[in-house]
Image (cartoon, grey):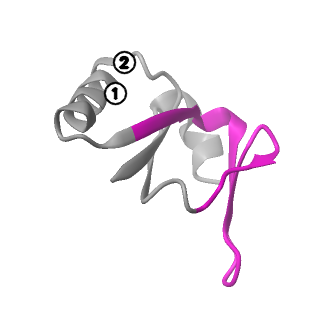
């Protein structure tokens, strides 16, 4: 399984635990800065973009947003 985490800080303890669990179970994972990522919701073609560049939708099986209190406002708009 391939997991993509949208997080502000991949060095936080909770993210370290997610990453260890992924490694222990043989899953691939990546992290992207949630403040530099856009989710475009569209019925036929939803998109995920990082710094304006599209992310291949076939890369990740699961996208997990990890939005902290510092970016809650922008994260829910």
Residue 11 image point, x, y percent: 41, 15
What's the magenta region? 29-57
Label 2 Cα crowd, 10 Å radius (few <14 / some 14-19 / many 20+): few
Residue 62 image point, x, y percent: 41, 57
Where does label 1 land, which residue?
Answer: 15
Nearest the viewer among 27 and 16 is: 27
Q: Picture quarter containing residue 37?
A: top right
Specify whether residue 12 is painted magenta: no
Label 1 Cα crowd, 10 Å radius (few <14 / some 14-19 / many 20+): some
Secondary element at image label 1? helix
Mark 1 and mark 2: span between their CA atoms? Answer: 5 Å
Secondary element at image label 2? loop
- State left or right for residue 53 relative to residue 30: right
Nearest the viewer among 4 and 73 is: 4
**Residue drawn 69% across the image and 84% down it:** 44
Where does label 2 land, which residue?
Answer: 12
Residue 36 image point, x, y percent: 70, 35
Nearest the viewer among 30 and 71 is: 30
Q: Quadrant of the C terminus?
A: bottom right
- State left or right for residue 19 relative to residue 63: left
Residue 46 image point, x, y percent: 67, 70
Nearest the viewer among 31 and 14 is: 31
- Looking at the image, do the residues carrying marks 1 and 2 touch, with CB atoms under 8 Å apart? yes
Q: Residue furthest right?
A: 52
**Residue drawn 30% across the image and 43% down it:** 27
- Residue 41: image tag: none
Against 41, residue 74 (above or below) is above
């Amino acid at each position: 399984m391939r997991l993509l985490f949208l997080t502000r800080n991949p060095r936080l303890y909770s993210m370290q635990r997610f990453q260890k669990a992924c490694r222990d179970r043989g899953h691939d994972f990546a992290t992207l800065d949630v403040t530099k990522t856009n989710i475009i919701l569209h019925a036929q073609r939803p998109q995920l973009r990082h710094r304006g560049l599209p992310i291949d939708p076939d890369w990740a099986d699961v996208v997990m947003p990890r939005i902290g209190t510092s970016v809650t406002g922008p994260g829910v708009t």
